[in-house]
């Protein structure tokens, strides 16, 4: 009886359509979120994340409808985020059908937001999303970036993760901006540094290309879950293939009979 | 007659409702005491804080209606916090009372493991469980909680282990509870809900 390592699929959306970019830039259309959600529900994903990467105020109702359409396809947990600035925003996202919400920029600006959300929704529903990069490849630590990876904050990613958990976050979604879209594997140093420093589950994100990358981030870096988007949407790597690879190597994963 | 899904603000009733509808069961949201009067069964899909649930049930008058229904043996399924609500109290909110259907208190999971217990885990099922009938010990179920029932009585129907052993499912007569989320647990979770519907009759 072991807690399974989770394979999570991310749907980056412009609010309405799934999009895919490299290093947070150069977006192109990658499909309908509800259709993709139905496919991943069938293929054995352990969880879905749907993000509004444009996160502008005017199309908020559209994104809430997208959450509803995605949730209707799932018998799996769903996390939603992007542009959540207040407990009211978080409540709307949960009401639309998400089980958890991610908060990023707004938590950096006001960490008490995590505390308020944990008090109202429970810590298990509050995921702190951290986008980090390291000019020195990990030497000298990783800096937290906000606003979709654009703005440096001078916050240290490991310390911010610890502060976020102390404030109420029940999970960390940790994205390496350096690796995102590069298909060169997860940033294991970053993941290991954060996973070892906090008492909550850590989802590694950014850089996945092969089953071996998932194996590495679970066994070497101690991630509790690993997230990918493009490789699954395009079909260059499938969830059943990743799980089979992990199971054969003794990693506990959920495989439905 | 339909399955009443209790809606008290924090809980995510929609996904539970959809899960039952996929199995062909008629459901309705219940937000007021009158909604429970002629329910075929009652489902409490709790998420969040024990204290918030207890206060919301009391403030809406649902608590008294729920107790009346339980006394009349209307079938009940509590999910996550909705299972914990079947016990007398919880250390998450010591000042509040639960439904007291089962004896004992809900306690925090040990702090030497990552909390919340979040993700897919397996069960050790007690022989004869109606709720877990037909499920393989290899099946995984989705959990998201930091508190648990660690010393259940004869109502225990399945155990899970994370940091320590705790009750993953309970059942006695017409009262059922699961610490995991069947509505989020794929095909295995759907089977648990199907089993509950069979018990409802």
Image: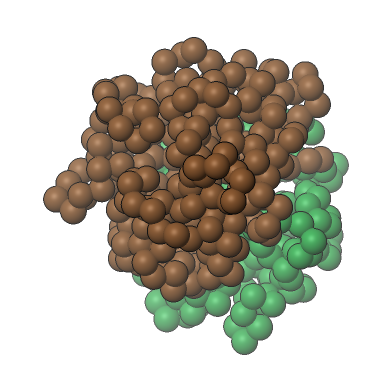
Chain colours: A brown, B green
Q: Is residue B104 left or right of residue A66?
A: right
Which residue is pictured at 68% across the width and 45% down the height? Answer: A192
In the picture, the quarter occupied by the N terminus of chain A is top right
Residue B81 in the image, given as x and y percentages of width and height: 59, 62
Q: Quadrant of residue A187?
A: top right
Which residue is pictured at 74% across the width and 70% down the height? Answer: B107
Residue A2 in the image, given as x and y percentages of width and height: 78, 41
Return the residue found at the far top. Answer: A236
Q: Quadrant of residue B18?
A: top left
Q: Is residue A25 left or right of residue B60?
A: left
Residue B85 in the image, given as x and y percentages of width and height: 61, 68
**Vertical position of residue A214 compared to residue B48: above or below:** above
In this view of the protein, can residue B91 be seen by the observer?
yes
Return the residue found at the far left. Answer: A58
Q: Nearer the viewer, residue B191 or B64?
A: B191
Q: Nearer the viewer, residue A2 or A10?
A: A10
Residue B79 in the image, given as x and y percentages of width and height: 58, 55
Which residue is pictured at 66% across the width and 58% down the height? Answer: A198
In this view of the protein, can residue B119 be seen by the observer?
no
**Vertical position of residue A220 compared to residue B48: above or below:** above
């Amino acid at each position: 009886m072991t807690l399974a390592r989770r394979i999570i699929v991310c749907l980056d959306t412009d609010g309405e359509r799934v999009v895919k970019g490299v290093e947070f830039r150069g977006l192109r259309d990658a499909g309908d979120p509800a259709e993709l959600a139905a496919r991943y529900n069938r293929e054995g994903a352990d969880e879905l994340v749907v993000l509004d990467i444009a996160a502008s105020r005017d199309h908020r109702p559209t994104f809430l409808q997208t959450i509803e359409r995605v949730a209707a396809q799932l018998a799996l947990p769903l996390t939603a985020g992007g542009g959540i600035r207040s407990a009211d925003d978080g409540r709307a996202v949960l009401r639309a059908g998400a089980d958890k919400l991610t908060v990023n920029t707004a938590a950096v600006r006001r960490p008490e937001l995590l505390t308020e959300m944990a008090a109202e929704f429970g810590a298990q529903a509050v995921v702190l999303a951290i986008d980090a990069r390291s000019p020195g490849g990990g030497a000298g630590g990783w800096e937290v970036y906000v606003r979709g990876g654009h703005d440096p904050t001078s916050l240290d990613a490991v310390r911010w993760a610890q502060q976020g958990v102390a404030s109420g976050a029940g999970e960390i979604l940790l994205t390496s901006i350096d690796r995102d879209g590069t298909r060169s594997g997860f940033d294991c140093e970053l993941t290991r540094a954060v996973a070892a420093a906090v008492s909550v589950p850590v989802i590694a994100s950014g850089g996945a290309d092969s089953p071996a990358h998932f194996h590495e981030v679970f066994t070497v870096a101690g991630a509790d879950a690993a997230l990918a988007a493009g490789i699954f949407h395009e079909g260059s790597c499938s969830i059943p293939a990743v799980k089979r690879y992990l199971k054969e190597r003794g990693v506990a994963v959920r495989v439905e009979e | 007659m339909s399955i009443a899904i209790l809606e008290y603000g924090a809980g995510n009733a929609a996904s539970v409702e959809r899960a039952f509808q996929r199995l062909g069961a008629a459901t309705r949201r219940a937000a007021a005491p009158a909604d429970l009067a002629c329910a075929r069964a009652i489902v409490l899909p709790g998420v969040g804080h024990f204290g918030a649930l207890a206060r919301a049930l009391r403030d809406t008058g649902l608590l008294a209606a729920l107790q009346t229904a339980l006394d009349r043996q209307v079938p009940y399924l509590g999910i996550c916090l909705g299972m914990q609500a079947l016990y007398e109290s919880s250390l998450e909110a010591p000042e509040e009372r639960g439904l007291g259907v089962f004896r004992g208190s809900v306690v925090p999971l040990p702090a030497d493991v990552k909390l919340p217990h979040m993700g897919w885990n397996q069960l050790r099922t007690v022989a004869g469980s109606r709720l877990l009938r037909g499920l393989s010990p290899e099946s995984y179920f989705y959990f998201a909680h930091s508190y648990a029932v660690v010393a259940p009585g004869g109502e225990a129907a399945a155990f899970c282990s994370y940091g320590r052993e705790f009750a993953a499912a309970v059942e006695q007569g017409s009262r059922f509870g699961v610490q995991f989320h069947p509505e989020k647990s794929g095909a295995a979770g759907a089977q648990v809900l199907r089993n509950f519907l069979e018990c409802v009759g």
